[in-house]
Image: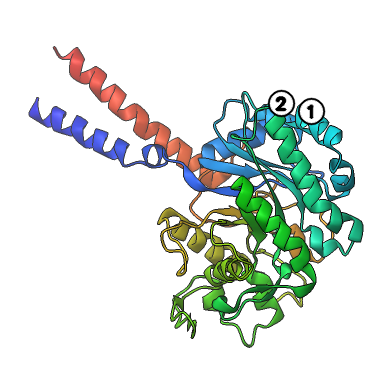
Amino acid sequence: MKTSSFFVALLLLSLTSSDLFVQTRGFNFGINYGQLGDNLPSPSSVAALIKSLKVSKIRLYDSNPDILSAFANSGVEFIIGTRNEDLPSLKDASNAQRWIQQHVQPYISRTKIICIVVGNEVFDSNNPQLTTSLLPAMQSMYNALVSQGLAQKVTVTSAHSYNVIASSYPPSSGAFRQDLIQYIQSILSFHAQTKSPFLINAYPFFAYKGNPNQISLNYVLFQPNSGSTDPVTNLHYDNMLFAQIDAVYAAIKRLGHTDIEVKISETGWPSKGDPGEIGATPQNAETYNSNLLKRIEQNQGTPAKPSVPIDVFVFALFNENLKPGPLSERNFGLYYPNGNPVYNIGLKGYLPGMIGKSNSNVLSINFVVFLLPFFMFTWEFSRY
């Protein structure tokens, strides 16, 4: 009797320490869900994948109704976006009202939409019409949310490429490009008034690719390295991403604001690239993203903002075969479209009907471990 009871207790211990129970908590990071591919899984399948990954936030570059419907009652927080080409029309209050009525109102009661990104990397377009339309479109969208009683639930912002930064080293010298200050100054005032975040797309990969002889690979991959010390603040940096974030904070402060949070709307590392794209390998992508997730799990802040945990959206969920540009652009995904991971960063997820071999084994082992205590309990009680 004592032996069988001990065996049951041992099995319960193995159950509670198995992956089935270890992976019950969510990961406090976001993933960019791009859709530039002709072989991507259905939104309902992706919803199952995200649920199995325990990812808490998703960023879309549009407001795809099929995706928003597929994630109904999932609890996943959504950032949705407008197209750059729609900015001129969204300056008009009635158009902004219609956009909210069509793209937010039908879904927000069941799908947790928390933010609208008005345009992506607009200042990189070199299009004066888009540049001058950005802030008015943001204001119109915010006013539309206010009029429909949604401004307390949904924030309005825009996502910028790191090209808006003219100086980033050392981080305390961070400054925006002089030709953009007239626009960014007003955008920052909008953020301060509406308490919305400033979003930046930051990729240490591009910095390393452009200057591999001067930039330490370990520094950009969060690997052990000597790092660098900012001579003005005396703050020490052991990775480039944190230095980039603090440079943005310094640039914002230079324009008179200290109350705006910086969030990373995109960062990642490609697993493959053209011959000239130095560093684009599966090993480096795995190292960058796995080390980044460890920093996120530890709720780390940057040296200049140690009490503010970094808020990051990893780019991207899938490899997207229709993305233009160099080979790397089509190989930023954590997963292949068939649901298999491109590399292992410790996330265990699966697509329905497309479970990879390693994931199948994990699930099978967990299932067996789950059943064993049940049978042992049945046997134990049958003896009474």
* Residue 69, image x, y percentages: 69, 27
Q: Give the left or right position of residue 263, taking residue 296 as reference.
A: right
Tally the numbered discs: 2
Q: Residue at x 89, y 47 (%)?
A: 88
10 Å crowding of disc 1: few (<14), some (14-19), many (20+): few
- Marks 1 and 2 close (CB-CB < 8 Å): yes
Q: Amino acid at mark 2?
A: Gln
- When asked about the image quadrant of residue 24, the answer is top left
Q: Give the left or right position of residue 226, taking residue 215 as reference.
A: left
Using the image, determine if residue 173 lies above or below residue 368: below
Real-space Cα separation, disc 1 to disc 2, in angstroms: 6 Å
Q: Nearer the viewer, residue 358 or 304?
A: 304
* Residue 308, image x, y percentages: 45, 57
Q: On the rendered image, what quadrant is the C terminus found in?
A: top left
Q: Residue at x 78, y 41 (%)?
A: 140
Point out which mark residue 105 bears.
2
Write down the residue under mark 1. 102
Q: On the rendered image, what quadrant is the N terminus found in?
A: top left
Q: Give the left or right position of residue 39, taking residue 176 as reference.
A: right
